[in-house]
Amino acid sequence: MNIAHWLWQTAQAWPARPAVRLGDRLMHDYAGLLRAVAARTGVLADRGIGPGDRVAVFAANAPDYLEMLHAIWWQGAVAVPVNHKLHRSEAEWIFDHSGASLVVTDSGAQFPGRAELALDAAPGASGPPGPPVARDDADLAWLFYTSGTTGRPKGVMLSHGNLIQMTLAYALDVDLPQPGDHMLYAAPMSHGAGLYMFAQVRAGGVHLLPASRGFDEAEIMRLAQTCGGLVMFAAPTMVKRLVTAARASGWDGTGLRTIIYGGGPMYAADIDAALAQFGPRFVQI
């Protein structure tokens, strides 16, 4: 099954549910998200992107990022999300190593000489959206590059079946998504934060992109209290920063449901401080 089929199913079942927010602004319900993805598949098709092609995405978090990833899978292509904070030469090495035939960037003009597309390029009009291209569970979906701490980054090949099983395990072992959740993407969607989107799509929850397009403690505290049901991935350093800001402002975690943390060492004193400030809202991966 194509992992994008979950968006197709959710949009049919709950078309009017809120799907994507940029800060306080509702960008799409699920029917609207489906139409936006369908329009982007047309743009990719015009660029010759089809099943098995690799498309790199080198950009900061944005609603367009979510749309583009699903459009890539909808076409049966392979997403290669690249950390947008990498040095130019590091990013170009990944583009070459992955065999990316198209690079999607914020401006659409960051890598002269390459086939490039702007992330926010306005897609053309599209007809009624159809289902995604059929894919087998063994077909490649996400080419995930490691940090390369012991050498060059390695391209980890995640199939559609891998992502499906990961998402089912997430609901059992990490956090059970709720329809009213707001999944906040304060960490890069090119990393773990992006992988968790599938569970949110499946549950028909809201994908919340901060207006800052990154991690801002004051913004997160405000969004948690205004949106409620906030779920987010955070590296341990981010947790520590959020606790420090919460202490200074007197915020006790109201509106925050779950923080999933990992990707680095969490010192006992830091998680003790987080639990004292927010209570048992943490899942360690």
Image: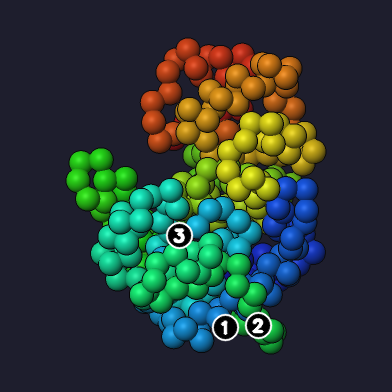
In this view, 204 is above or below 36:
above
Residue at mark 1: 42
Q: Amino acid at mark 2?
A: Gly
Does residue 22 appear anywhere in the picture? yes
Decide: few, some or many residues near mark 2? Use Cα within 10 Å; few <14, some 14-19, many ≥20.
few
User: Which secondary structure lies at badge 2?
Assistant: loop
Residue at the (33%, 65%) spot, across then down: 95
Asked whether the beta carbons under mark 3 and mark 1 sit within 8 Å of each other, the answer is no
The answer to whether 173 appears left or right of 115 in the picture is: right
Q: Position of residue 19 (x, y in %)?
A: 71, 58
Q: Which residue is mark 2?
A: 124
3 vs 1, front mark: 3
Please give left or right for residue 134 compared with residue 43 in the image. left
Q: Quadrant of the C terminus?
A: top left
Query: In the image, residue 61 lies at what x, y percent?
Result: 56, 53
Q: Residues within 10 Å of mark 3 (few under 14, many from 20)?
A: many
Pick the residue in front: 109 or 158. Answer: 109
Q: In which quadrant of the rendered view does residue 251 lie?
A: top right
**For the residues marked 3 and 1, what is the alpha-carbon distance in whole angstroms?**
20 Å
Residue at 64%, 75% in the rendered image: 122
Gap in angstroms between the C-alphas marked 1 and 2: 8 Å
Tell me the number on the disc at residue 58: 3
Image coordinates for residue 127, horizontal then vertical, percent = 69, 87
Taking the spot 50% from the left edge, 47% from the top edge, the residue there is: 188
